[in-house]
Amino acid sequence: MTIVRWIVGVAIFLFLLLVSLQNAEPVKLRFYTWVSWEVPLIFLVLIVFAIGVTAGLLVGAFRSARLKRQISRMRREHARGATDSLPPPPLPGI
């Protein structure tokens, strides 16, 4: 699995490298009429890519934390239910 991850990472890196070499001309980014910003196109593409990766990682982290809480809650309920369903211990001397 780590080999596949490396291959995908290298492929994404090479793709972004080729895109950056081909898209170096400046573009004007406007936010309505308040702000205007002129940057190279690849800089804008890389910023959007980084925001997407960060958002994906945050969503994954929140989901992982929620699932861990759910697993621990289910384990506690299972342990509590297992002790409740056990028959009472036998009385000594009988």
Image: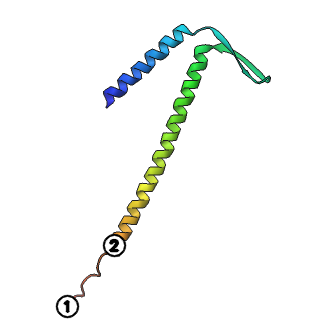
What residue is drawn where x is 33% and y is 27%? 4
Residue 73 in the image: state x and y as whole percent.
43, 60
Kindly give the residue lying farthest to the front in the view shown. Answer: 32
- Disc 1 marks a residue whose amino acid type is Gly
Q: Which residue is mark 1?
A: 93
Q: CA distance from mark 1 to mark 2?
A: 24 Å
Q: Nearer the viewer, mark 1 or mark 2?
A: 2
Residue depicted at 43% across the width and 51% down the height: 68
**In the rendering, at what x and y percent does residue 84 appear?**
36, 75
At 37% across and 70% down in the image, what residue appears? 81
Would you place residue 76 above or below residue 19 in this image?
A: below
Point out the tag, 1 or 2, that comes first from the N-terminus. Answer: 2
Left or right: residue 75 versus residue 88 is right
Judge by depth and name the residue closer to the eye, 7 or 92: 7
Q: Quadrant of the C terminus?
A: bottom left
Q: Which residue is mark 2?
A: 83
Note whether 61 is above or below 2 in the view shown: below
Secondary structure found at label 2: helix
| Image disc number at residue 51 | none
Name the residue located 40 percent from the left edge and 19 percent from the top edge. Answer: 11
Q: In the figure, is residue 39 to the left or right of 13?
A: right
Q: Secondary structure at mark 1?
A: loop
Q: Point out the residue furthest to the right here.
A: 33
